[in-house]
Structures are given as structure tokens and as C-alpha cells.
């Protein structure tokens, strides 16, 4: 019932990125005016080719940019009505926005339980043990793996990284390529759980992906970014039915099935920029 | 061969070795979490021992109170040292930071000489008996206390890094600073904490050794002696620091034994650990428990 009530009025954006530019090492400009809105309680995806600036956008939001000598030189980022574009990474986490970095980035020389406990570092309440059970409820196999996290499989490490994010009790989670290096079956499983967490807990998600197919099916809204600019955005249906998106990101398009020869010489005929 | 003396020396070596292990753990703690090789480690012992001495002599406080006051002072001292001197150096070349720690070492040695003079001072009597007989061995009461304290510190280190929130945060920072920040851990806070812990715990060792040998500038030599211990164990291994400390402690005493009985070269007690250091660096540059990719100095 409460779900329906939320759906009636358009959700207000919990995160709003307004025309930001990002420069690395004071000379390399990566983002040239990226704007996006993430409505509360929804899953929004950010798609784009390699080097488009997807991860940079996420790092600008989470404040991790500073650890890589990057800087937001223009524009602003607002999270829950508060400017966060100049905050330290640890303060952004405290304000309720948690980033799961690309490549899982778990602490390999600790056990999975210790990794989960670290996720709750910013919390002071006594419900941490209950939340560990909650994470095991979503990822039952983590409970069986008591050894060092470095020995977990790629999929288990990704589950641990998402579980660790849940331990922080965030309002919003930014996921950077959760499908990276996972088998198709695991990708399906991980996306299923992401969707489930979003529905159960109402945690807003910003999902950066190369796997456009899965990402668009999970998300309510999507942005496509190329060469540091947002080139297209729309709802799930709009993007799934967009001819260009079909051609460039989902494969196929509305044309006749190409022969193998055609595929080999297939060249991209259209660019947005 | 004088077996009784040899066994007595080995026991002494184990006791002193435990203290080396404790100081070595502090050294490793700072190295692991901040990547800084701290050449001012010995001065933590020196400053701690002098402060405790001053508190006991001038304020005439009971030993336990003076000891705890010194601990509190050293914790603040370590944190302030990191915040004022070393924090501005974050991101600078590591060799510059190491030079700063050498500078700090010289500065604090001179400062202690200036304030307390160059002659050794002894602590007021803490225990009613000077030494205790255990299985026919003569063990100084202060050494017995030091063994107990060293073991308590080691267990406390283990519990802290295994179970406490901040211990886990320090390990996470040692593993990868970016991951730590993404979890909401303040890396600066962790750095300050590691210097505070290193200063406090090292001071304990300084006080105990000061109680046996008297307080003087030679205390800072322990900081140098810890090098062979830590390098033997592996620069980034806490267990290695303890094992290395015990080995060096026993070794210098055994070297002293053979020197005084047979060789008569003199001063082997101080020099033997460095011969060992030389040989270790030759054959096992990463130490017994060290990670292979660590920086060599």
C-alpha cells in the first residue's frame, strides 16, 4: 500500500548532479558537464562505453575523486538537500551515501565477517549483529565462507561488497559495475538481489554498468554518457525501445539478422557526438 | 662451560626480547598503517622514561599513578606529533618523511639532555625486593613485571586488531587507504591513532628498562636495536616483530656469554644483532614473516 502511495506523486530527487566538470591532475578533463537526477527509492542506471566517465561521475559523487587527484571544477552535487561536491569521502558515507567501488575492493586479508563489520564503521547503534543476519538473509552463502575474503570467488566477493554496503544502512548505494568479471548466471543472481534490496529496503541505487541489457531491465530510469557528457536519458521503456540504444548497447536493432561477414565489418554508423 | 650463567643469560635474553618485541610491534604498526619507517622510535622510550621519572621524583606520586599519567601524556604526545609534524607530509615522498623522523630523533635526544642532563638517574624503589629466585635463577622484579606487561600488551594488541572497530579500521587502512575511505574511515584519524599507540606502548618499555638500568640517553639505543629484530621478523609483520625481538634478545646475551668466556673481543652485546642484521638482509631481505613486495630500506 505504501508502495502505491509513493508511486502516485513523482519522487523528488535524493541525489542531483548539476552540470559538473571533473579534472584529473589539474589538466585532464574527464567530465564536460554531466547532469543527472536520482529519485528517492528508485534504481537509476548510468551506461556508456569504456572511458566515457561513468566511474569518474560516481567518484565525484562519493568524494573518492580526491584520493585520485581529481577535482570537481564546475557544477554542484546535492544529496538530500546538502551540497556534497567538496566533502571528504568519509563524510559522504556518514551522510548516507555509500559507494561499492569497481572491482569489488574487499579487504582480502580479513574474513568476510570482518569485512561486514567494517561496513558498519560509521554506525554507533547496537543493531549491527542483526544487520549481519540481514545480509546473510540476502546472501546465504556468505555465512558458510568463514575463511579469508581473498579466497572467495568473484561472485561471492561482489556479494560481500554489496553486503558490506548494506551494513552502513545507507540511504543510497552507488554500484560501480557489479557485473564485472562475473559469469552470466551470477550476473543474473546479483542483479536480482540488487532489485530485491531496492524493493525491500527502499534503498536508492545508482548503477553504473557496461552490461546494458541487465542494467536497463533492473532500472527505472537510465542515462547514457559518452566522452564525458550525458547524450541521452529516459525511462526504462523509452531506452529499451530507442533504436540507437538497441543498436549500440543492446545489439541487433530492428534490422534483418546480419550474416557473419556483415558483423565482422560492422561499423558504427552513427554517433551522438 | 658455565651452564648456569648461560641459562641465566638466555632467560634474561627472552625477557628483554619480549620488550624488543613490544617496541618492534609499535614500529611495525606505524610502518604498516602509514608506510613511515620511524627512526624516532627509540626516543618514545626515552621521553616516556624521563617523563615518568620526573613525575615520580618531583610530584612524588605513587608508581602506578605516575605510570598511568605517563601513558596518558605519551598518547597525546604521539597524536600531536603526527598531527603537527607528520600530517603536512602526507603525499610527500616517503624519503622526506623518513628524514623528518631522523630529525625528530636528534631533536628529542637533545631536548631530553637539555632538560634532564646527561647523567643516568635511577627510579625510586618500586618493589621491596630487587630480584626474585625462580628455579634457582635470579630474575629482577622489574623484569618480571616487564614480562607480565609485555604479555598483556601483546594480548591487548591481538584483541584490539581482531575485535575492535578501530583495530579493524586500522587494518583496513593498512590494506588499502582508498577502500578505507570508501567505508567512512578517516585515514588521518587512523594515522594519528597509530602514532599515539606506538608512543604509549613504547614508553612502557622505556619505563621498565629505565627501572632496571636507570634512565639515560642510552635508552634510545633500544630503538636502533629494534631494527634487526623487526627486519629479521619482516618489516610488516606484527608476529614477526615478536619473534624477531625474542631472537635478538637471546642472541645478544648468548653472544655476550661466548665473548666474555672465550673470545674476549668486547662489546659483542651491542654489536652481535647488527652482524645478524647484515646476514639476514643478505639471504632473506624480506625477513621471516614479511610480505614480499614491501619496500626495502
Image: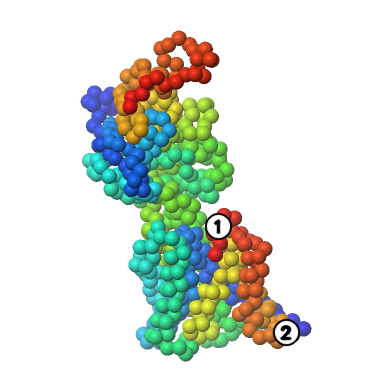
Q: Position of residue B291 (x, y in %)?
A: 58, 56
Please provide percent x and percent y for residue A244: 36, 19
The image shows residue A45, relative to residue B284, as above or below, that is: above
**Residue at the spot 31% in from the left edge and 32% down from the top edge:** A229
- Which chain letter goes with mark 1? B
Viewer-proximal residue among B227 and B212: B227
Residue at coordinates 53% horizontally, 66% vertically from top-left? B25
* Residue that label 1 marks: B294
Q: Are marks 2 and 1 in contact (CB under 8 Å)?
A: no
Quadrant for the C terminus of chain B, please.
bottom right
Q: Is residue A86 visible?
A: yes
Residue B263 image label: 2
Q: Is residue B266 left or right of residue A273?
A: right
The quadrant where residue B90 appears: bottom left
The chain under label 2 reads B
Task: Give the CA separation, mark 2 to mark 1.
Answer: 38 Å
Q: Secondary structure at mark 2?
A: helix
Q: Disc number at residue A184?
A: none
Give the residue at the far right of this rendering. Answer: B1
The x and y percentages for residue A161 are: 46, 40
Res A28 → quadrant: top left
Residue A41 visible? no
**Which mark sits nearer the N-terminus, 2 or 1?**
2
Assign the N terminus of chain B to one quadrant of the image: bottom right
Element marked by disc 1: loop
Towards the viewer: B255 or B279: B279
User: Residue sitting at 38 percent across and 71 percent down?
Assistant: B77
- Label 2 Cα crowd, 10 Å radius (few <14 / some 14-19 / many 20+): few
- Residue depicted at x 59% and y 85%: B131
Amino acid at each position: 500500500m505504501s508502495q502505491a502511495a509513493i508511486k502516485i506523486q513523482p519522487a523528488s530527487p535524493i541525489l542531483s548532479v548539476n552540470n559538473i566538470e571533473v579534472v584529473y591532475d589539474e589538466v585532464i578533463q574527464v567530465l564536460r558537464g554531466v547532469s543527472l537526477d536520482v529519485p528517492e527509492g528508485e534504481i537509476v542506471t548510468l551506461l556508456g562505453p569504456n572511458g566515457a566517465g561513468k566511474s569518474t561521475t560516481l567518484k565525484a559523487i562519493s568524494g573518492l575523486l580526491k584520493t585520485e587527484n581529481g577535482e570537481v571544477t564546475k557544477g554542484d552535487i546535492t544529496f538530500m538537500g546538502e551540497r556534497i561536491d567538496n566533502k571528504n569521502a568519509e563524510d559522504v558515507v556518514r551522510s548516507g551515501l555509500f559507494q561499492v567501488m569497481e572491482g569489488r575492493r574487499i579487504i582480502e586479508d580479513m574474513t568476510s565477517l570482518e569485512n561486514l563489520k567494517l561496513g558498519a564503521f560509521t554506525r554507533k547503534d547496537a543493531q549491527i549483529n542483526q544487520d549481519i543476519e540481514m545480509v546473510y538473509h540476502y546472501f546465504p552463502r556468505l555465512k558458510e565462507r568463514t575463511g579469508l575474503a581473498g579466497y572467495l570467488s568473484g561472485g561471492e566477493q561482489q556479494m560481500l561488497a554489496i553486503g558490506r554496503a548494506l551494513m552502513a544502512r545507507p540511504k543510497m548505494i552507488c554500484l560501480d559495475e557489479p557485473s564485472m568479471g562475473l559469469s552470466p548466471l551470477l550476473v543474473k543472481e546479483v542483479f536480482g538481489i540488487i532489485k530485491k534490496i531496492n524493493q525491500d529496503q527502499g534503498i536508492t541505487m545508482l548503477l553504473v554498468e557496461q552490461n546494458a541489457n541487465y542494467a536497463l531491465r533492473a532500472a527505472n530510469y537510465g542515462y547514457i554518457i559518452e566522452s564525458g557528457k550525458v547524450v541521452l536519458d529516459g525511462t526504462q521503456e523509452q531506452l529499451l525501445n530507442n533504436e540507437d540504444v538497441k543498436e549500440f548497447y543492446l545489439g541487433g536493432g530492428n534490422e534483418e539478422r546480419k550474416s557473419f561477414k556483415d558483423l565482422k565489418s560492422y561499423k558504427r554508423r552513427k554517433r551522438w557526438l | 662451560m658455565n651452564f648456569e650463567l648461560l641459562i641465566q643469560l638466555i632467560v634474561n635474553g627472552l625477557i628483554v626480547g619480549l620488550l624488543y618485541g613490544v617496541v618492534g610491534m609499535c614500529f611495525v604498526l606505524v610502518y604498516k598503517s602509514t608506510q613511515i619507517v620511524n627512526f624516532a622510535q627509540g626516543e618514545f622510550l626515552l621521553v616516556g622514561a624521563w617523563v615518568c621519572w620526573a613525575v615520580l621524583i618531583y610530584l612524588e606520586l605513587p608508581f602506578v599513578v605516575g605510570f598511568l599519567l605517563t601513558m596518558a601524556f605519551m598518547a597525546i604526545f604521539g597524536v600531536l606529533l603526527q598531527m603537527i609534524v607528520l600530517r603536512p607530509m602526507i603525499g610527500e615522498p616517503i624519503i622526506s618523511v623518513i628524514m623528518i623522523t631522523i630529525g625528530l630523533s636528534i631533536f628529542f635526544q637533545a631536548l631530553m639532555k637539555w632538560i634532564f642532563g646527561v647523567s643516568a638517574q635511577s627510579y625510586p624503589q618500586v618493589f621491596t625486593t630487587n630480584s626474585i629466585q625462580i628455579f634457582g635463577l635470579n630474575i629482577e622484579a622489574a623484569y618480571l613485571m616487564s614480562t607480565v606487561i609485555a604479555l598483556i600488551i601483546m594480548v591487548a594488541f591481538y584483541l584490539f586488531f581482531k575485535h575492535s572497530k578501530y583495530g579493524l579500521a586500522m587494518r583496513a587502512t593498512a590494506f588499502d587507504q582508498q577502500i578505507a575511505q570508501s567505508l567512512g574511515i578517516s585515514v588521518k584519524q587512523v594515522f594519528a591513532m597509530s602514532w599515539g599507540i606506538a608512543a604509549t606502548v613504547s614508553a612502557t618499555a622505556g619505563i621498565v628498562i629505565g627501572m632496571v638500568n636507570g634512565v639515560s640517553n642510552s635508552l634510545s639505543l633500544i630503538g636502533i636495536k629494534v631494527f634487526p629484530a623487526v627486519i629479521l621478523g619482516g618489516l610488516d609483520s606484527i608476529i614477526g616483530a615478536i619473534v624477531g625481538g625474542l631472537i635478538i634478545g637471546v642472541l645478544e646475551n648468548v653472544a655476550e656469554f661466548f665473548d666474555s668466556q672465550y673470545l674476549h673481543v668486547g662489546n659483542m652485546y651491542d654489536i652481535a644483532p647488527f652482524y645478524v642484521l647484515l646476514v639476514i638482509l643478505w639471504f632473506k631481505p624480506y625477513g621471516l614473516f614479511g610480505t614480499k613486495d614491501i619496500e626495502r630500506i
